[in-house]
Amino acid sequence: MPRQASHQIKANPEKNPRRDPTASGQRDAAVNRIASHNYFLLEKFETGVVLTGTEVKSVRSGTANLKDAYGIIKDGELWLLNAHIGPYEHGNIFNHAPLRTRKLLMHQEEIRKLIGKTQQKGLTLIPTRMYFKNGRVKVEIALAKGKQLWDKRETDRRRTTDKEAREAIARSRKDR
């Protein structure tokens, strides 16, 4: 009679996908919240970005900042300027420069469309968020038109009245 194995083989438990919400794409790595305050965001585009290995690790750890960043089109290519990605804490002498110019990846026909739109007066390219999608870093850029001071005041006024209306509705529902 053959001898039976006394141990059972366990299947490898799957890794918890919620372990790193930034890397799994559930949370943005960086968001430019001031962009909607300073600009009218007209149209948004998803682009890839060319990064080094230490830059990807830094973005994953949450050290990216898009506050002063903007995009330009030069020689038919899209570039991201002034995006700050902090140095990787476990890096060595080959660590990246935090404010280097990074190339954005987009289809040529979309770039041609953007060239025509950015040559109009007052339109610029502003990155609104940086996130992971299928393990790759993506940057959402928006075609934007700058707001005047009175536009910003109008936006704040509208936001305040909407908030007060929501609170009044919530109070009336609570009183019932």
Image (cartoon, rainbow, N blue to C red):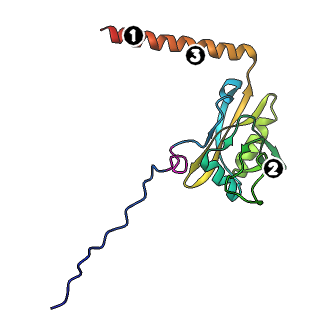
Give x and y (percent) for residue 75. 84, 50
Name the side, left or right, on which 73 lies relative to 19.
right
The residue to which callout 2 is attached is 76
Relative vertical location of residue 58 with respect to residue 166 in this rendering, above or below: below
Front disc: 3 or 2: 3
Name the side, left or right, on which 86 lies relative to 29.
right
Give x and y (percent) for residue 141. 68, 40
Q: Check disc 1: other Cα within 10 Å, few if <14, some if 14-19, many if 20+.
A: few
Q: Residue at x 63, y 15 (%)?
A: 156
Check if mark 3's residue and mark 2's residue have beta carbons within 8 Å: no
Q: Quadrant of the C terminus?
A: top left
Relative vertical location of residue 60 with respect to residue 122 in this rendering, above or below: below
Amino acid type of disc 1? Arg
The residue to which callout 3 is attached is 159
Relative vertical location of residue 171 with respect to residue 12 in this rendering, above or below: above
Task: Point out the stretch of residues depicted in magenta.
Answer: 20-26
Disc with the residue nearer the chain's start (1 vs 2): 2
Q: Secondary structure at mark 3?
A: helix
Amino acid type of disc 2? Gly
Q: Is residue 22 magenta?
A: yes
Disc with the residue nearer the chain's start (3 vs 2): 2
Name the side, left or right, on which 169 lies relative to 153.
left
Q: Residue at x 41, y 11 (%)?
A: 169
Q: Check disc 2: other Cα within 10 Å, few if <14, some if 14-19, many if 20+.
A: few
Q: Nearer the viewer, residue 119 or 160?
A: 160
